[in-house]
Amino acid sequence: MALACDYRMATTRSVFQAPEVKEGFLPEMAVFRLAKYIGIGAARHWLLTSAQCSAMEATHSGIVDNQCEATAFAEAIRVSQLALLPVHPEVLRNTRRLLDESFATPFEDAIGHFLAVQNLCLAKLAN
């Protein structure tokens, strides 16, 4: 679930695990997202063994962007939100789209997609 989010925070007590394979079913889109975040070798190990991952390991591998003590969680979220402002909805939506396409789109096509989206976003900002 965390891998579908734009920004991921955890407390130092957080533990991450994907037990689905050992339970007899596929781990949904984690198969695709996890390999992109941490590499196929680490994703294979984590998904096939259902290994637990601490918040520190998750932060170092890129599964989590930031970690803090549980008592400081609300303040850490507030600071993270401020760092993400201002939000331009059209630019944000298209940046997400381009990021999602980035691993599957050939570079030549990606340039065209980027230019088209950039033109669209600039036109929205001008209005």
Image (cartoon, helix red, strand yellow):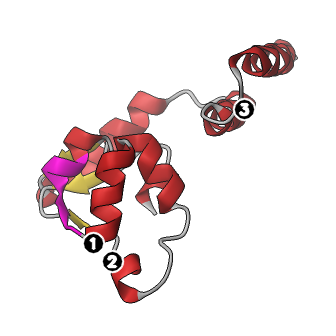
**Do the residues bearing badges 2 and 1 touch, measured as CB atoms within 8 Å?**
yes
Q: Which residues are magenta?
A: 51-58
Q: Could you say where residue 3 lies in the image, as x and y percent from the top left? A: 45, 53
Quadrant of image for the C terminus: top right
For the point 75% across and 32% down, the residue is 90
Left/right placement of residue 118 relative to residue 76 reads right
As measured in the structure, the alpha-carbon distance from the residue carrying label 3 to the one carrying label 1 is 34 Å
Q: Earlier in the sequence, mark 2 or mark 1?
A: 2
For the point 63% across and 37% down, the residue is 96
Q: Could you say where residue 17 lies in the image, as x and y percent from the top left? A: 28, 69
Name the disc covering residue 19, or none. 2
Q: Amino acid at mark 2?
A: Pro
Q: Amino acid at mark 3?
A: Asn
Residue at numbered disc 3: 94
In terms of secondary structure, where does tag 2 sit?
loop
Left/right placement of residue 76 relative to residue 4 reads left
Q: Is residue 39 visible?
A: yes
